[in-house]
Image (cartoon, coloured by chain):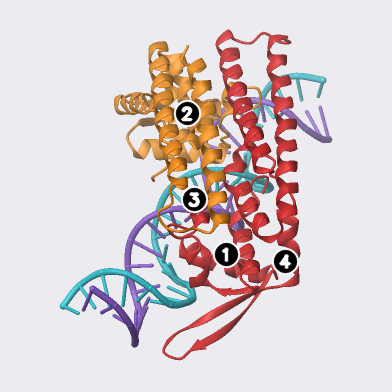
Chain colours: A red, B orange, C purple, D cyan
Amino acid sequence: MSNGEMPAEHAILGLLDLDEGAGHGYDLARHFGEGEPLADVIRLEPGMLYHHLKKLARAGWVTSSIEPQGIRPPRQIYQITGAGRAELRRWLSEPVAHTREIRLEFLVKLYFARRLDRALALRLATEQRETCLRLADSLASQLAALDTPGETVAPDDLAFRRLVLELRLSQTRAAAVWLADAAK
Amino acid sequence: MSNGEMPAEHAILGLLDLDEGAGHGYDLARHFGEGEPLADVIRLEPGMLYHHLKKLARAGWVTSSIEPQGIRPPRQIYQITGAGRAELRRWLSEPVAHTREIRLEFLVKLYFARRLDRALALRLATEQRETCLRLADSLASQLAALDTPGETVAPDDLAFRRLVLELRLSQTRAAAVWLADAAK
DNA sequence: GGGATCATGTAACAGGTTACATGATTCA
DNA sequence: TGAATCATGTAACCTGTTACATGATCCC
């Protein structure tokens, strides 16, 4: 679990929290469909959604109860718990560790932080930017270290390594610039 | 399978092709270990490596034979086939479709293209850059379309959508700039 | 004697995709 | 008559991660 902290599960928690703390699967699924802002960021098929709801229940972050509907099929109503809310806040307050996680996980965090608590969203974006800047520094020094050779490396390998680091650096810097804007 | 065309399998094909067309699992595994240029780009644990070798054999891209070693355990020697070489070339000549695939899949392509055929590497990087520029155009026009409102959207949703598109655009443009350098 | 190296894997688990099953109801 | 909506899921499959199993030999 080094990598990626279940953005889908937390998105479900976030949706429940926004929607007065309760909802059912079919209803939640609509938020991931065509035209919804979250659909541009994370995809979630019904199968996985119901799977995640059960996982959240096992973790104690939601509870469920059945609501009969008369003619229509009965609904499983999921209710976010105190522990669920605490977990959501914890998750929303932590920036992601890697540049590649910005596109999906960070954007999901940002979406919910913006609706739940504007100040939290600003703090999140600011800290994410600082994380990126630290990463950029590290990449820049790795790049510099390539030119002061310790062992002899094949020149072709060296050129390729430089390309890899330059790509990572440029992506990370671009993210930092964008984050300065997102933190407004 | 909309997404990502098995970079690990193709990396194995590429290693076999570089190494006179043949090799065994343990030997291939070393190329993904500490300090190797590919290790910065793609991770491949032994378990998955052996799994991929069997898949490649089922696809007809490699054949295998056992080489007894006397005292040491016998080796499964894998040999790339004509079909395997053709598949490798096809894969190496196609840029990736999405910006997020540049970091892993495109870099693997670039690594092998550079060692196998310099002209191919330049063509690949150039076409990848053009793909990125087209994507950037599309994102820019989606951004512009946000300001000419068809339906009424919540202003908060609109701001979030703009952020998402701006992030994708900045990442794609950064990749295009880097690719101009990589195509030299 | 203990750990690294050689060499090939299996097992368990986590996450995700695609497709399908059910069965009533409303709408064109 | 047929499609879409409501509502919940299962099944099969693929990719990937972590950890372990085997058993000899080489090196400190």
Answer yes or no: is residue B150 visible.
yes
Chain of the residue displaying label 4: A
Circle number at residue A85? 4
Classed neighbour count for the residue bearing mark 3: other residues with Cα under 10 Å, few (<14), some (14–19), many (≥20): some
Label 4: state its secondary structure: helix
- Residue toward you, B163 or B38: B163
The first of marks 1 and 4 along the sequence is: 1
Q: Amino acid at mark 2?
A: Phe
Classed neighbour count for the residue bearing mark 2: other residues with Cα under 10 Å, few (<14), some (14–19), many (≥20): many
- In contact (CB < 8 Å): disc 1 and disc 2: no
Q: Where in the figure is residue B69, as x and y percent of width and height?
A: 52, 25
Q: CA distance from mark 4 to mark 3?
A: 25 Å
Above or below: residue C15 compared with residue A129: below
Residue sitting farthest toward the bottom: A70
Above or below: residue C6 compared with residue A84: above
Q: CA distance from mark 1 to mark 3?
A: 20 Å
- In contact (CB < 8 Å): disc 1 and disc 4: no
Q: Amino acid at mark 1?
A: His
For label 1, the residue is A52
Disc 1 versus disc 3: nearer the observer: 3
For label 2, the residue is B106
Classed neighbour count for the residue bearing mark 1: other residues with Cα under 10 Å, few (<14), some (14–19), many (≥20): some
Q: Amino acid at mark 3?
A: Asp
Q: CA distance from mark 3 to mark 2?
A: 23 Å
Q: Amino acid at mark 4?
A: Arg
Q: Are marks 1 and 2 on the same chain?
A: no
